[in-house]
Amino acid sequence: MSMRTNKLQEWHNKRIKPEEINKYLSASGKDFIDDDLIIRTLENNKNPDKKRIHDILSKSMTIETLTLDETAALLNVSDKDILEEMREAALKVKLKVYDNRIVTFAPLYLGNECINNCLYCGFKKDNESANRRVLSMEEIRREVEILAGQIGHKRLIVVYGEHPKTGIDYMVDSLKNIYDVKVKTRKGFGQIRRVNVNAAPMQVEELRKLRDAGIGTYQVFQETYHHETYRKLHPKGTIKGNYAWRLYAMHRAFEAGIDDVGIGSLFGLYDWRFEVMGLVAHSRELETRFGIGPHTISFPRMEPADNAPYAVKSPYLVNDDNFKRLMVAIRLSIPHTGMIITARESAQMRRNAFTFGCTQTDASSCIGIGGYAEGMQKQKGNRQQFILGDTRSLDETIREYAELGYITSFCTAGYRCGRTGECIMNLLKTGQEGVFCKLNAILTFREWLDDFASPETKKAGERVIEKELNEVKNKLPEFYSRLMEQYEKTKSGERDLYF
């Protein structure tokens, strides 16, 4: 065994701390996902009557997390008319909590070295055709200069593989470098204001360092909540093979003082109804134990990946109709959460998703390592984790959303004003956060239109702004005067003004 292999194994052996799992387990040593209970609950709630569904929808409208029984009832609805009522209710919930806005971001993959061997992933360590690379700090700066200075993004989700080359010290340095980039634009400047992190489960001590570095939301997806399937897809002896270490990643994040977390499931690994139930169980566990549910939930569908045949051969691949149903179920079952639909999906599916209650999406996405600075136009399987379904530019995407009547928000104010954790949960559940979101969406959209938009997109965007300003004037008159002061300053070139 080489010295390099020895060091890698030593790093591997130190990753999981049993004491950071065991204290959260039940007296019998079990975690909070009970597979048999979920399956029984789904079975026991077949054929729900219309009145019960209406009662559940009414509860969801109060922005209260549903029980597993209630979620199971929604998942068992087959009547088309009731399904349409559920979709309409999901949209009402979204508007009540988040108003008429769509938050955009970009993914930034910093490395594809990985010590794990997941059967469905192009980054698995046994994929010898993968073009392995970890970006240097200078390369990261060049990526961010494109994202913040040419495209106009204000928030990123930064993605790291699980490997010592992209360990906690690298993460902290990369976050500092990203936040330091500032690029002159037409009237103001471009800068990333919030960096969310998608990374492997971490130790509490490491998570504290990540918190101090200015992390936004910390994302860890369980992939599948079904224990047996998890074991089959994540080989024993790998770090990711430990189900409980991953499951309690959010518990450790809260313990470390990170108060915005994001959970998710990779749909297509196991039955989609079970995975929705797992997400609800996870949300309820966090709310019960910490008083704070997940800030976001992601629900990516599995896509083809380099040298990963399971990604196209899984018996649980989710068709479009069921994908729409699971989005509605998530919005109704966990009504306070932000819902992220990614560019894995087609443009048409993403348009549909906003009528089901989704609130966030990426745009102008390039997931090849170093691809933004290199102008990578075509997707290359051996340089990215999976294949994207929508590669349109941010300008094209925003123009379409504006023509559909949505305002694109680049706001990150709440996080810097302390509206995070338990505070934002309360504001979301009472509908108050939507007020701040509406005002700040107008200001940040004005910024982006002036600094980055094409003439066609600017015209479409200004029509939306006019409509939004009129709504504030008529529905929130107490804010209108101050908003217009901030708005005029923004038009004149001042940046990062917010409520």
Image (spheres, helix red, strand yellow):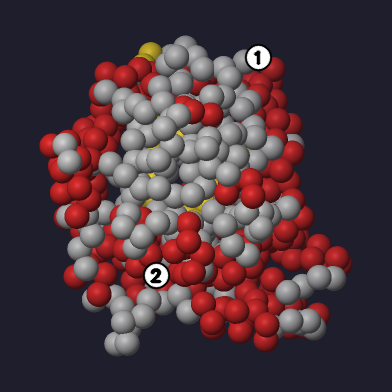
Q: Position of residue 380 (x, y in %)?
A: 54, 24
One can see residue 426 in this view:
no
Q: Position of residue 488 (x, y in %)?
A: 50, 26
Q: Position of residue 114 (x, y in %)?
A: 34, 41
* Residue drawn at point x = 32 percent, y = 54 percent: 238
Foreground residue among 470 and 461: 461
Disc 1 crowd, CA 10 A, few/some/many (<14, 14-19, 20+): few
* Residue drawn at point x = 61 percent, y = 27 percent: 391
Compared to 201, does 22 lie above or below? below
Q: Position of residue 19 (x, y in %)?
A: 19, 70
Q: Residue furthest left?
A: 3
The number of callouts visible is 2
Compared to 193, does 66 lie above or below? below
Q: Is residue 193 left or right of residue 54?
A: left
> Disc 1 on helix, strand or loop?
helix
Residue kind at label 1, given as amino acid type: Pro
Q: Quadrant of the N terminus?
A: top left
Residue that label 2 marks: 286
Disc 2 crowd, CA 10 A, few/some/many (<14, 14-19, 20+): some
Q: Nearer the viewer, mark 2 or mark 1?
A: 2
One can see residue 457 in this view:
yes
Residue kind at label 2, given as amino acid type: Leu
**Residue 252, image quadrant:** bottom left
**Residue 256, image quadrant:** bottom left
Compared to 180, does 385 lie above or below? below
* Residue drawn at point x = 49 percent, y = 28 percent: 382
Q: What numbered label is drawn on residue 455?
A: 1
